[in-house]
Amino acid sequence: MSTRKGQIDPPHVGRAVFSLDAQALQPLVRAVVSEVMAEIEKKRKAESESTLPIKPLLLTPRQAAGALGISTRTLWDLTQQGEIPVIEPVPGEKRHHVRYDPVDLAAWVQSKKASRQESSPP
């Protein structure tokens, strides 16, 4: 490259400075890339944790029966007898959808355990 007419700069003058800067910047670039990759990984983990299945607050009859290990018919019979509480549908709904609260189901199981322990001979 010439700076003045007829004069040529030595080939190493401009490149030596640039390569020294590039070599000096490599650790900084690596550190920045590592930080960015760590941040991306954090976001991916947060997204995957937020997309984990959410437990339903109320269970359908099929889910409730499955949780109790009984048939849906037996569940319905117990519901009709008043042994297991049911959450009635919202007024105005066209379809009759009943739901069960898992807390109520757990309480029913505990009451059954307690009644068995009371009735069993010592």
Image (cartoon, rainbow, N blue to C red):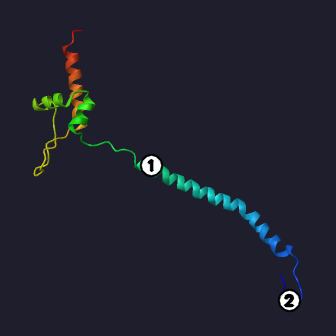
Q: Residue at x 28, y 43 (%)?
A: 56
Residue 23 sits in quarter: bottom right
- Give the position of the N terminus as an image quadrant: bottom right
Q: How many discs mark residues in the rendered view?
A: 2
- What amino acid does circle 2 point to? Arg
Residue, disc 2: 4
Marks 2 and 1: in contact by CB < 8 Å?
A: no
Q: Secondary structure at mark 1?
A: helix
Q: Residue at x 84, y 84 (%)?
A: 2
Up the image or down, 87 lies above or below 70; here it is below
Q: Would you say 8 lies left or right of 70 here?
A: right
Q: Residue at x 15, y 35 (%)?
A: 85
Extreme residue toward the top, this view: 122
Q: Secondary structure at mark 2?
A: loop
Query: Residue 97: image x %, image y %?
Result: 16, 43
- Give the position of the C terminus as an image quadrant: top left
User: How many other residues sit within 10 Å of disc 2, few (<14), some (14-19) or many (≥20)?
Assistant: few
Tell me the tag on residue 48: 1
Up the image or down, 28 lies above or below 82; here it is below
